[in-house]
Amino acid sequence: MTAQDLTNFLAWAEENGIKWDKNAIEVREGKHGLGVYAKKNLEGGFEAIQVPKSIVLSAVSTGIANLLEEENVEGYVGLTLAGMYEASLGTESVWSAYLALLANRTPVMASDLPEDARELMKKCEAYADIETDLKDMQSDYDTIVVPFIEKHPDVFTEDIKAKFFSFENFRIMTAHVSTRAIDVDDFHVSAFVPFVDFINHSSEPNAEHLAHEDVCEVCGALSCEHMDESDESDDEDVEEVPELAHENKEKRAAAKKAAAAAKDSESDDEEDGDWEDEDPENTCDIVLDEDIKKGDEITRNYGPFPNKIFLSKYGFAEIGNPDDTVTIQLEMIRKAADGILNNAALVEERVKWFLDTEDIFIGESDDEDSDEEHEGGCCDHDHEGHEHHDHEHTHVAKEAMADVDEEDEEEDSDDEDDFPRDIMYMDSDGAVDDRILMLMNVLFMEQEQFDKIQESVDVATEYFNDVFLRRDIEENGVEIMEENEDGTEDSKVELEPLTDAARQVRKNVLEAILAVIRLRADAYNVTDKTTAEDDLEALLNANLSGPLFYGGVCVQGEKQILQSGLKHYGDLLAAI
């Protein structure tokens, strides 16, 4: 990137209504490439950037929006084609200055590494995601992109196709989409949001992206005749919507013209900072969550993702990522349990019961982190490694056991497809997730207890509540207070001693968890005595860069989780 590219972009941004306080922030090169930095101390709540939705680049704002709609090309492929088409227009594109800046800043993705370099990451979970991305990218190009451009030779001439629509062009624009696309609203869905996409990721962000998502899916307006008609009749014929493609452009243009006229009629005595008070609902905004100092980079959180997703989607990984995980396959749990019980039929019976009933007991997380923004972009495919779930248990709710009608059962059935049932996780601290802990207890409880939890919802609820209460107090050192009827806290909760039978169940659970962890750890030669910390130091001194370095971060992170898990559960087993 040249300094002129950035200068041209900033001039373009200002011309197109993107607003920022030039005395407060600046765009410059930093530790992670181009970023946005504070030029002075700024307070929380400060609106750093405001981008009109009229200037975001999406599959519905591009010049070929009508063609993409007619051919039902959407998702990351639709946005990628939109970017490629606008790039092919050169200076005739509305987004020419923005795309020129991107053209000289092609992200280096893990999928760009040569095969021998990717082999170094083969033990890492990200490896499968990267290989899948490569295959899917080629398939999407061959089955979607090529037929699409060949169907419209008047738009995509032979010269244009050769210069701007090769697989290499598609790969590069896909990388831009994967690393930059942001979820905007129900109309644009995922889009390039110039300037906002300069905000880099941090697990401890100081800002967030805000945009009004609930807009008309037909024209993008906050309120319009389409929404009014929808309110009047829920069964409106949706097949008529595609016919409004060109009409939408006219309406958006008219709306922009009316907004501009209204703006001109207002007093022009406003100071530069007054734009922060304007209605934010038509814009994509970056707002500070906390005070920052001069020189600090403005950052946001891209989502609570493990490193394998960061690497395959964004091209980086985070050392010490608090949301990192290690995947545990259900088959590993079956193998470990059968090794202790030597009863495959019993294992299968209880696994089936758990999978059929677990939704009753696993509640959604109450953690605020579960509301973090998950960006759109590339990776629309259902890679098993891209499924990251926060099914975090607090307390089993008896209300969840209420009888459901047929309609609810259908909804539950649909929800079951939201995540793979045969995938579970170890968290960044080495602890197994709630599903593993529950399943292990189901597998090793005595037959009499298993019969009881099958027969009684209340018994099952009480049993699992006790499992998680003991984990919180004994393993995590959480101090839990008894609550009186009036809501006030009284004395600290004291656990009853385990019976001999319960102690044996716990012993078997811990042994099985350790056996499962060893199935993963053996591939890395990890034990509770190895030092993943030394591996990190060696990695930092290896003079690696880009995806190869971040691939090493993924490997080291997984080894650290496995090592922590072996030590943690080994200590618990030794204490019994």
Image (spheres, rainbow, N blue to C red):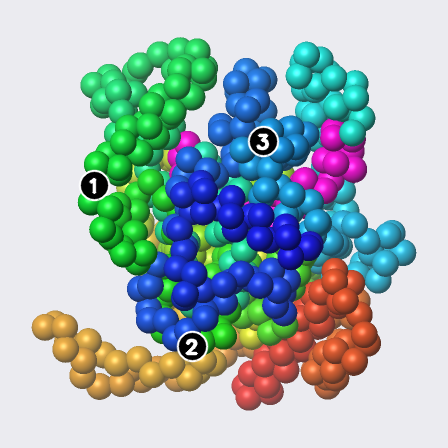
Whether residue 91 appears in this view of the structure is yes
Element under label 3?
loop
Element under label 2?
loop
Q: Dot 2 corresponds to which residue? A: 293
* Camera-nearest residue between 378 and 479: 378
At a point 76% along the width and 49% down the height, the residue shown is 111
State the image coordinates of residue 471 (x, y, percent, origin top left).
44, 75
Label 3 and label 2: CA atoms lie apart by 38 Å
Residue type beneath disc 2: Lys
State the image coordinates of residue 3 (x, y, percent, origin top left).
64, 57
Whether residue 410 appears in this view of the structure is no
At a point 23% along the width and 79% down the height, the residue shown is 482
Q: Are marks 3 and 2 in contact (CB under 8 Å)?
A: no
Residue 266 numbered tag: 1
At a point 27% along the width and 56% down the height, the residue shown is 271
Q: Dot 3 corresponds to which residue? A: 93
